[in-house]
Amino acid sequence: MYGKSIKINHWLIPLSWLYGVGTKVRNKLFDWGILPAEEFDIPVISVGNIAVGGTGKTPHIEYLIELLRPHYHVAVLSRGYKRKSRGFILADKKSTAREIGDEPYQIKLKFPDITVAVDANRRRGIKILKEKFPKLDVILLDDAFQHRYVTPLTSIILTDYNRALHLDKLLPAGRLRESRHELSRADIVIVTKCPKEMKPIEYNLISRWLHLFPYQNLYFTTLAYGNIRPLFPEINPDKDISLKNISKKNGLMVVTGIANPAPMIQHIAHFHSPQVQLHYPDHHNFSTSDLNEIASQFHAMKGEKNYIVTTEKDAARLRTAPLDKSIKRALYVLPIKVRFMQHAGTSFDEKISDTIYKNRRKRQEPQSLKASLK
């Protein structure tokens, strides 16, 4: 059911009122032009959310990359959450998750041919990218809905199916970064992590509860998991493995450091019952004691062959962790992609491509994605 995991700390509601006053004043200062917002001559697509926690921004950014990169020069600009560096940094093959953040690192590993950069100052980051890469056609801004100093060409907001906006509260009582009424600033709203068996009436109810305007487009996506693959193929030559092909005689451990591991656990449970589950906070930096706990639990497992399954985001941090070979050989990554529901993927693709095509710089003439979709 929509919003089933809503939990409100009611005793903190007075603090939420104060927080709400602050966010409302800040937004009004931007609305009135007192705080400056800058628009650029290159298409900028912002992908963000209105609530803290995992709504699936990275898989949706990756969806846009796969959609656009065959036809456009694409860059991704992120703040690099929890990185141990400052200022503008351009990712390269030597970059680490500590330097640029786990999500930008994951994106760069999966798409080494695109430009990935981090900068908390998005205006400065865009200007540097334009200067360094004059042939750029589009910039994807990661987690930038609250960064109003940049006015994007298109703003995409993600909201988790499991935490309904109309039932949530502002921080710290709830998880909203700002009032749900600020959703009106979005051009596209995507309800993410939807169950595959959603009924037609639920689509209609969610649409009503969101109270979107006619100029806004609403989409629904679900998570699609792939086969697990070795994190360290240099010492584990296994090919991709379907979870259903893992024998019940083999042990399985799940290690996560994400906001909501429940969908992943539910997916795995269809095929295998994990002997051990170790769940850490979102963007968790694995300490020596954490790695020792993983190793201890792993070696205590019973099975002919044991597996450790983790997320792509966690893999970005575990890749450079000091793990022994037995753990590296057992460590597998479970990739995810987003799938649009109601057969709406083509509609979304065409809307994005039309927007970029009509607003791109006149001096550039990249191949039209729209034409290739016909």
Image (tube, rainbow, N blue to C red):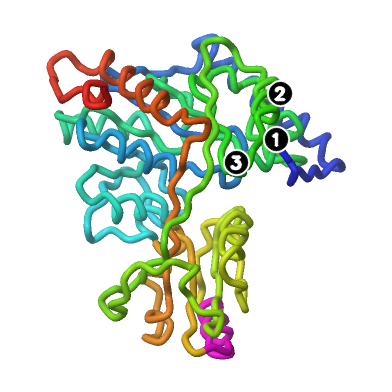
Mark 2 surroundings: few (<14), some (14-19) or many (≥20) residues within 10 A: few
Please state which of residues 14 and 360 is positioned toward the viewer in this rendering: 360
> Is 369 situated left or right of 264 in this image?
left
Q: Is residue 138 above or below residue 247?
A: above
Q: Which residue is rendered at x = 33% and y = 18% of the image? A: 355
Q: Which residue is rendered at x = 48% and y = 66% of the image? A: 310
Q: To which residue does mark 2 refer? A: 209
Q: Earlier in the sequence, mark 2 or mark 1?
A: 1
Q: To which residue does mark 3 refer? A: 194
From the top left corner, tell me how far across and down residue 211 is, in percent.
67, 18
Q: Disc 3, disc 2: CB below 8 Å? A: no
Give, as a three-letter code, the residue at label 3. Cys
| Segment colored magenta | 290-303
Residue 67 occupies quadrant: top left
Q: Which residue is rendered at x = 65% and y = 29% of the image? A: 200
Residue 352 occupies quadrant: top left
Q: To which residue does mark 1 refer? A: 164
Give, as a three-letter code, the residue at label 2. Trp
Q: Disc 2, disc 1: CB below 8 Å? A: yes
Mark 3 surroundings: few (<14), some (14-19) or many (≥20) residues within 10 A: many
Which is in the foreground here, disc 1 or disc 3?
3
